[in-house]
Amino acid sequence: MLHYDHYYTIGVTHPVCEDYAAQGDTPTPFIVLSDGCSASENSEVGARILTLTTKYIIENATPWPLDYLSFGQQLISKALGIAEQLQQPPSVLDATVMLAFLHQDSIMVYVYGDGCLLFKDHAGNLGTIEIAFTHNAPYYLTYWCDEQRWLEYAISEPKPLVLTDSVNGVSEPKPFQTQLAFCLPLKKFKVIAIASDGATHCINTRKSVKLPLDEIATNLLAFQNLKDEFVKRHTKSTLEQYATQGIYPADDLSIGVFCQ
């Protein structure tokens, strides 16, 4: 049986939570999260618009699934229309979007921006993939629809994308427009999670060091049971235990998990 749940929480350095997440089961189980850009005003609003628009598209798409490019284009087009109705500038939508959904016997993951994939195989072996941009400026969907911003981004750094794989190490720098679509077969993986880059920003304030992603992933995926809101319950418990050790998420953290 496939269980799935999500959770999001504010980072200690933020006055407002710019992450948001949601899930659904029509026409297939899915989880979506969005991480607003701190440098863009009201991006917490944009994160909610993008998340809820994703949910609407999936639940009403015929057929589903859409491919990576088609989904991204449809999402940003609809989200821009909503932002305009709210009299918000396009930059309010400067936010990462991560979508994970069941397709046949695999979990498909689409990433538009930065973030992390966390997974465990059926033998309990942990794996992680960190998606980052060297100039700390993720390639958001908003760049797709603004030629001037797209050109400025392309000129500033044509190959800023780096994937850090716990098995294969750090990738060569990749073009910013590389399609970030992943297929994780359930036959191989027992636990599959998506997480915002807040998973890479847990700080031990007593030692002034950042915890490595594999340590964070090990703790976040150590579920005791899979009942009800298991991700919310376990993540809150993990962060409470961290706090007793002086460890806190500096950035907002959102996570969605599929588990067998």
Image (spheres, helix red, strand yellow):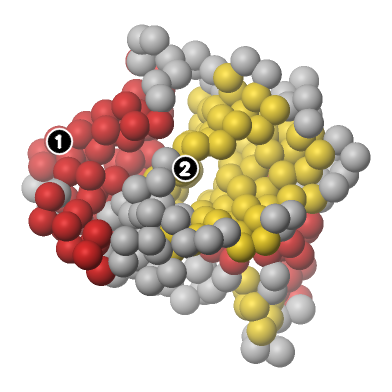
In the rendered structure, the answer to whether residue 35 lies left or right of residue 42 reads right
Q: Quadrant of the C terminus?
A: top right
Give the quarter of the image for residue 243: bottom right
Give SS at disc 1: helix
Name the one closer to the observer, 244 or 79. Answer: 79
Q: Circles 1 and 2: CB distance less than 8 Å?
A: no
Give the quarter of the image for residue 191: top right
Name the one closer to the observer, 40 or 190. Answer: 190
Give SS at disc 2: strand
Residue at (70% x, 28% y) in the render:
185
The kind of residue on which mark 1 rests is Gly
In the rendered structure, the answer to whether residue 208 lies left or right of residue 92 reads right
Residue sticking out furthest to the top:
62
Residue 238: give x, y in percent of width and height. 74, 60
Label 1 CA crowd tier, 10 Å (few <14, some 14–19, many 20+): few
In the rendered structure, the answer to whether residue 159 lies left or right of residue 250 reads left
Residue at (23% x, 44% y) in the render:
144
Task: Please say if 1 is above or below 33.
Answer: above
Residue at (74% x, 54% y) in the render:
167
Task: Please say if 84 is above or below 135.
Answer: above
Residue under label 2 = 180
Give the quarter of the image for residue 230: top right
Residue under label 1 = 81
Q: In which quarter of the image is the N terminus?
A: top right
Res 36 visible? no
Residue 134: give x, y in percent of width and height. 43, 69
**Which dot, 1 or 2, sits closer to the camera?**
2
Mark 1 or mark 2, earlier in chain: 1
